[in-house]
Image: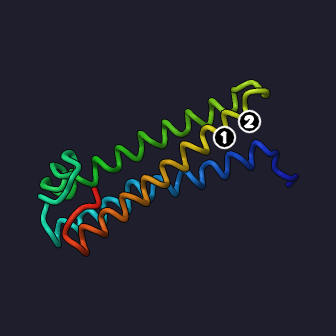
């Protein structure tokens, strides 16, 4: 097989970072939030939607998170398609903008993880 084009390489990298961001923001947040609730109680959850979800059956909690993951994957797919359809002179800056957005999502995911760990260890949020 021939060497992949720079665009194909960028798309593979885009999906790798997207997967990492979604893993942090959905899976890691869900698991650490559930553990935090088991340790300190739901009253320490600062997100009211998540606090409400954590009082529902696990099937509802998992279903909402799976639906959110599906929606986000569709939105990120649309973003990748926009990059492909962007005229060549604007494609580079547009890619950098998306990379910055993914960086912010990763930072947010790491903060949420750290916050949940603070709740578990110290019994209070970083916020």
Q: According to the image, label 2 marks what residue?
A: 92
Quadrant of the snapshot with the N terminus: bottom right
Quadrant of the snapshot with the C terminus: bottom left
Q: Residue 24 versus residue 121: which sits nearer the camera?
A: 121
**Residue 61 horizontal side relative to residue 56, left or right:** right
Residue farthest to the right, as pictured: 2
**Residue 102 horizontal side relative to residue 66, left or right:** right
Determine the image quadrant of residue 124: bottom left
Q: CA distance from mark 2 to mark 1?
A: 6 Å
Q: Residue 87 versus residue 111: which sits nearer the camera?
A: 111
- In the rendering, at what x and y percent does residue 10 appear? 71, 47
- In the rendering, at what x and y percent does residue 34 appear? 23, 64
* Residue at (38, 59) in percent of width and height: 27
Residue farthest to the top, as pictured: 87
Instruction: Please tell me whether residue 10 is drawn above or below residue 93 in the rendered image.
Output: below
* Residue at (57, 34) in percent of width and height: 79
Q: Residues within 10 Å of mark 2 (few under 14, many from 20)?
A: few
Instruction: Please tell me whether residue 6 is drawn above or below residue 120 in the rendered image.
Output: above
* Residue at (66, 40) in percent of width and height: 96
**Residue 40 horizontal side relative to residue 109, left or right:** left
Element under disc 1: helix
Determine the image quadrant of residue 26: bottom left
Element under disc 2: helix
Q: Are marks 2 and 1 in contact (CB under 8 Å)?
A: yes
Q: Residue 48 versus residue 57: which sits nearer the camera?
A: 48
Q: According to the image, label 1 marks what residue?
A: 96
- In the rendering, at what x and y percent does residue 111 appear? 40, 58
Q: Residues within 10 Å of mark 1 (few under 14, many from 20)?
A: few
């Amino acid at each position: 097989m021939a060497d992949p084009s720079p665009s194909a390489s960028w798309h593979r990298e885009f999906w790798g970072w997207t997967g990492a961001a979604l893993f942090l923001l959905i899976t890691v947040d869900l698991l650490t939030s559930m553990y935090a609730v088991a340790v300190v109680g739901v009253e320490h959850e600062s997100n009211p939607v998540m606090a409400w979800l954590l009082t529902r059956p696990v099937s509802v909690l998992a279903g909402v998170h799976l639906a959110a993951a599906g929606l986000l994957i569709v939105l990120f797919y649309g973003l990748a398609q926009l990059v492909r359809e962007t005229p060549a002179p604007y494609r580079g800056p547009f890619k950098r903008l998306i990379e910055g957005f993914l960086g912010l999502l990763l930072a947010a995911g790491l903060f949420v993880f750290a916050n949940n760990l603070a709740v578990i260890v110290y019994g209070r949020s970083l916020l």
